[in-house]
Image (cartoon, coloured by chain):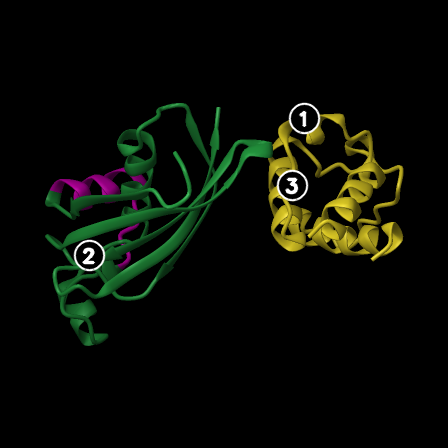
Amino acid sequence: MKKGDKFQYNFKITDETYNGFISIFNDKNPLHTSHDFATEKGFESKVMHGNILNGFVSYFIGECLPIKNVVIQTQEIKYIKPTYLNDELLFSAEIIDVFESVKMVEIKFVFKNKKEAKVATGKINIGIL
Amino acid sequence: MNTEDIIKEVNSIFIDVLDNDGIIVQYNTTSDDIEEWDSLNHIQLVVAIEKYFKIRFTAAEIVNFNNVGEMCEAIKVKTLAQ
């Protein structure tokens, strides 16, 4: 992997993903579970948990990179727009720096929805084992 | 920038990365002297220092530094060469 390498992957927030997240982490805040509550607060529908996107990032790092000997060392994410059930997201990532002295790769990423609006951006530092 | 000045700059990076305002690094400081300086934070420290000074170390250089001061001497050489 080298500076400038780019990757893309499509994700969808399915019922299985949403219900699985709630089942595992038990975050049933009404913003995430009540259509009426969410619309009263100005959203289109119940808002998906932001950390579902972190799950997608985990999948990308663990399964989509060309090497498997990687570990996430730091990760930051900025949520820009809400995501909703059945949203299809295009995840784009680029290696922006490589620190050979400590075998560390810095990757920036963005999630865009079908309207091509950025819903989240972030940065990940991964160590090469 | 002399070595003492570089140590002061590096001190600020240690405080930021290790999230401890009480850290004071000196020439002879090693990882044994700072509780938060573990293997993971070591990587973050090196990355932060390389970014701040716009330099790159080799893996061999990192391994051979015996203390903060020796690293700062290397930073001085590399920044002067730029």
**Overall secondary structure of the magenta section:** helix
Dot label at residue B46: 3
Q: In the rendered structure, does residue A28 fall within the stretch colored magenta?
A: yes
Mark 3 chain: B
Magenta extent: A16-29
Q: Marks 2/1: CA distance?
A: 53 Å
Q: Are marks 2 and 3 on the same chain?
A: no
At horizontal 41% and vertical 23% (from top left) the residue drawn is A69
Task: Identify the hue of chain B.
Answer: yellow
At horizontal 82% and vertical 42% (from top left) the residue drawn is B73
Residue type at numbered disc 3: Val
Residue A35 placement (x, y as % from top left):
14, 64
Q: Marks 2/3: CA distance?
A: 43 Å
Q: Which residue is mark 1?
A: B60
Circle nearer the N terminus (1, 3): 3
Q: Secondary structure at mark 1?
A: helix
Q: Which chain is green?
A: A
Mark 2 chain: A
Q: Are marks 2 and 1 in contact (CB under 8 Å)?
A: no
Q: Which residue is mark 2?
A: A33
Q: Please name whichever residue, A119 or B45, is drawn nearer the observer in this view of the structure.
A: B45
Residue type at numbered disc 2: Thr
Q: Nearer the viewer, mark 2 or mark 1?
A: 1
Q: Marks 1/3: CA distance?
A: 13 Å
